[in-house]
Each structure stands twice: as C-alpha cells, then as structure tokens.
Amino acid sequence: MSYKEAQKKYSKIGVDTEKAVAALAKIPVSMHCWQGDDVCGFETTGGASGGIQTTGNYPGKATTPQQLMADIDFAMSLIPGKHRVNLHACYGIHKDKVVDRDKLGPEQFKPWVEWAKKKGYGLDFNPTFFSHPKVVDGLTLSSPDPKIRAFWVKHGIQCLKIAEYFAKELKTPCAINFWAPDGYKDEPSDRLGPRMRMADSLDRIFKYRYDRKRVIPTFESKLFGIGVESYTVGSHEFVMGYAQSRKILALLDMGHFHLSENVADKISSFLMFFGKVAFHISRPVRWDSDHVIRQNDDLAAAAREIVRMGPENFLIALDYFDASICRVAAWVLGMRNMQKELLKAMLAPNAELKRLQDEADFTAQLVMQEECKNYPFEEVWAEFCRRQGVPAGEEWFDAVRKYEKEVLLKR
C-alpha cells in the first residue's frame, strides 16, 4: 500500500495523516547522554554506584567527551525530527583538575553548549546524587550528617545555575530533574526523619532564585534502588506532596513503580494538578533495570495519553542504560520506538473514541479500538521518515553496524 492509499483509508475514520506527520515533527524527545557510556561520566574511571547499576560489557563505549558527542550526533542522524540532549552533572568536562560537584559551574559545560549550538540541540540537565564518595551509607540530601547534606545542597544549587546557563545560551528552557537514591537496605526504624531532612535540603536548594521562565525543576520518585531495597526516601507520595506544595513538577519514570501498576493511568492526574507532566520513558524487567524501550503495551498506553492530552503539556525524556548491546543502536531504537508509538496514537480517531465512551457505546468503542490497530501505520511512518531524510525501516541498523566497525570497535 502507498502513502496516498493509507491517507485515504485513515481519512474514512476522520484521521488526517498530514496533520499527524506535521505534529510528530514538532515533538522533541530529550535523549539521555548516559546510554553512551554506561553512566560513567568524566570524573573518574569507575562505573555507576550508589543505588544505580549498569550491566554488560559490550565493546565500543564512549570514554571521552568527543567520543560521546560524536556518538550522539551519529545516533541523531538516524532519528527523524529535532530533539534535545539530556546531561548529568557527572558529564562536566574538566581541564586540568576535576572540579568537585559542589563547585561545578558553567565553565565545565561550555564545550557542551558550544556543541549544542552548532547542532541545534536543546539541553536538559540532572544533578548527579550518586557515584561519589559523599554518598555515605546510601544517603545524600537526607543524611543525618549536616556536612554531607550541605555538600549535596551546594551541588543542587550549582546545578540550577548550570541549567540557567544552558537555557540562556541556547534560548530554550532547560528541564532539570532532581533524583536522589537515598534509602535503606533493610527495614528502617525512622521513616519520617530522613524525609524531613530531604525536604529541608531541597528547600535550601530552591531558595536560590533561579529564572523560572528559563529553568523547569522536576522531582523524581522511585520505588527502590540497588542497595536500598527496603525504604526509599523519595517515594511516590513524598515526591508528589513536596512538588505540589513547592510548585515544581513531579516526574514520572515508567521504571520506578511496581510492575503491576499502570503508569499511563497516572498521567491524567498529574496533568490535572501540575499543569504539565515530566515523563521518563523506560522499561523495567522484574526490577528497575532500565531496559531499552520496546513497542509494548506500556509504551503504547503512555503515548496514547500524551497525544490525547496534548504533547505540548509534556516534557518527554528517555532514561535507560544497557551495556550488553551496541549503545548507539540502543539510542536509535528507543527514540524511534517512542516516535512510532506517538504516531500510532495520533493516527487513532481519538475524538470519535471519546464520543463513544461518553455515550456509553462501549461495543463500538471496543471494535474501533481493535480495528484501528491493523490500519496501515507503517506507510505513514515511512512517509514521515522520508520527509525527515532518515531510513524508515531496519536499514538504519546497517549504518550503525558500519559505524560500529569503523569507529566504535577501534576504541
């Protein structure tokens, strides 16, 4: 079937494929830099630690800023649309001596900004509250040691300044996401105290008068982490309460809930009470293992909610890290899968489905929901990719294999 034929078929159910293709091109997804080097960063030669872990030893990972930037550029060349790059604080570029995290500033991120300007990327940011000697007994912002807390508070303030720098230089708002791994491996005797300390630490961070037009703080919850399986300070309830009371955004991560929970179902409530939804797209398997996202039911459900409630109301970022497969392929596959599910959602007769629900015509609704799954989405996707100048099918992987052979495996 040709695109024109697919266009006619969709038009019969009231779907304009041209509008869908145009709308998809305007949705930026923030691609996470940490997939390219297993969340190592450029401070030490060690791996991720402190509530976080990457598994696998596939060859070719980036070990320098130049390699990581080149890998991101190559991945972006195979992904349709215009997107953003999400950085962690541990990816600062240090000249002679590594600057500790409580003293990081724009100077360590100038090369990133210069690169982003040349490539046309927006930048998002994250303080790094892990993989550091001052993650003591699994605690940072909630530590009972005031010196430990003070260090991480300073880090948070410096990161707000860096986010301001990104937004000002690149002329696009910067989302900065706060996630701390704090918790306990075994049953705690005091659940309230750590949460009160974390709230106080965050209050001290947000006393810094950042530019609210340029910087969008988000706060991410988690069910549990490696080494902190029994109690997480930043639980879902704590994060929602704190974020709403302090007028910042709570962030949903698809991998940070119990596997039986439907994360997509939470989106509408977040939108009602926060006005916007910050969303990390990931895929848990058994535990928060951050697998590369697949076109599965969970991703499809999330994409449908995003489209139905307006993509302009969402900050969409990917968050996974798999060191057992080609890292560049992991980026490209995940980003394209996200876009495919968004397009599928745009090609559904959403207004008609809503009408059928409101009129309690559940039989017709079910029939239409199911029949639409077999409509010629692939032809519309191919047309979108053609207009964006990227491969539509698996031939993109041929380009990755070539890059792997000529670049990655020679490192």
Image: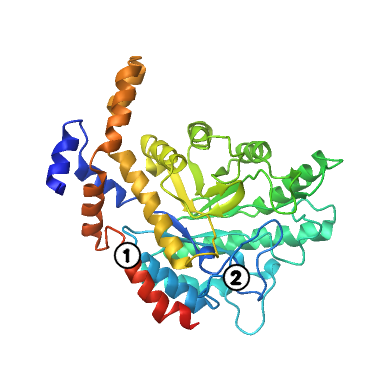
Please identify the residue farthest to the top as the structure is shown: 360
Left or right, 359 with reference to 287: left
Q: Is residue 181 left or right of residue 177?
A: right
- What residue is rendered at 70% in x and 66% in y? 102
Residue under the point 32% across and 64% down: 396
Closer to the camera in the image, 10 or 153: 10
Q: Position of residue 212 (x, y in %)?
A: 53, 50
Q: Residue at x 42, y 80 (%)?
A: 407
Q: Quadrant of residue 115?
A: bottom left
Q: Nearer the viewer, residue 240 or 205?
A: 240
Task: Where is residue 262? Give x, y as percent.
Answer: 53, 34
Relative to 155, residue 296 above or below: above
Q: Earlier in the sequence, mark 1 or mark 2?
A: 2
Instruction: Tell me the tag on residue 120.
Output: none
* Residue indicated by mark 1: 396
Rounded to the nearest angstrom, the CA distance separating label 1 from label 2 is 27 Å
Report which residue position mark 2 lands on.
41
Q: Residue flagged by tag 2: what amino acid is it? A: Gly
* Secondary structure type for disc 1: helix
User: Can residue 249 be seen in this snapshot?
Assistant: yes
